[in-house]
Amino acid sequence: MTDSRNVADFLGEDGCLQCGVCGKRKQLRINFMGRDRVVGCLCDCEVQARKEKEEQLRREEAQRELYQRKSVGLRDRRFWEWRFENDNGSNDKMLIARQYAKNWEKMKKENVGLLLMGPVGTGKSFFAGCIANALLEQGERVMMTNFSRILNEMTNYQADKNQIVQNLVDYPLLIIDDLGIERNSEFALEQIYNVIDSRYCKMKPLIITTNLGLNDMKDESLDVAHKRIYSRILEMCVPVYCGGADKRREEGTEKLGRMQSLISG
């Protein structure tokens, strides 16, 4: 390859400058209002250099926008590292996460959410975080948070609770991590239902991770507040059990089959 730094431009037969590398014109002679004039133009090298510069600027802008989306949607910086590239294979359900992200437009259109269940340390949050990062990198807006944080924001004396709920509804995908760790006050349960039901009404997908099992969520001894929250979640989300066999996992088979048919169809 010719090193352009060591090749001098030269004058062509018409007295116009030509590139010493590609040989194309850097000047043109034109007639303007009856007078000959020499004007500049881009040779192939300069056209290519401009394209490369524009592409570099485009990539830098895309990175800035991605950083902004992650800064807003993944406020816990450890979430940033939860990407499919960092999967160690410990969760055998990660294929579902990959397929969900790959087929996001179908999942969004059909309002298909996920309920990720299982014991502590089985990769549920990592599963959800990988989906979040994949969609953020595709340019989608995603919020991954938990109800403890949401409720803390709502109890701020200056907080506009309706606006907080509306902001959460506006995200194409909302991920709630660790459902069940938040306090169980009447106010808390009311707001949790409000967020979930508002997304249900707007047909916006929801992904939830929890240590609860289906038997816990369907327990007839639960109070009305918990029953209506869990009922709405099970209506919106496909149950996925992470971390070994689940004696109640067959209850989620029908919904999981529906999601897989959407992916393959």
Image: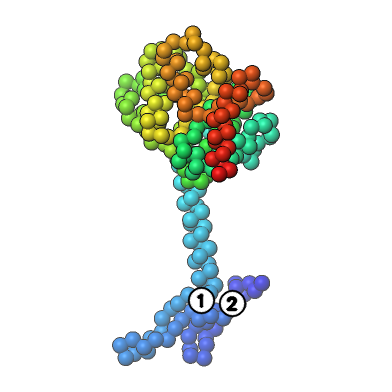
**For residue 248, which quarter of the picture?**
top right
Compared with 49, 11 (above or below) is: below
Which image quarter holds the C terminus? top right
Residue in view at x 46 percent, y 38 percent? 110
Q: Earlier in the sequence, mark 2 or mark 1?
A: 2
Q: Which residue is mark 2?
A: 21
Task: Indicate how the structure is coloured in the image.
Answer: rainbow
Residue in view at x 59 percent, y 28 percent? 253
Three-letter code for the amino acid on which mark 2 is drawn: Val
Q: Residues within 10 Å of mark 2 (few under 14, many from 20)?
A: some
Three-letter code for the amino acid on which mark 1 is drawn: Cys
Between marks 2 and 1, how big is the CA–CA gap?
9 Å
Could you say where residue 131 lies in the image, as x and y percent from the top left?
55, 37
Q: Which residue is mark 1?
A: 43
The answer to whether 63 appears left or right of 249 in the picture is left
Nearest the viewer among 165 and 264 is 264
Could you say where residue 182 lies in the image, as x and y percent from the top left?
47, 17
Which image quarter holds the N terminus? bottom right
Compared with 51, 191 (above or below) is: above
Q: Are marks 2 and 1 in contact (CB under 8 Å)?
A: yes
Secondary structure type for disc 1: loop
Q: Quick check: can you spot residue 178?
A: yes
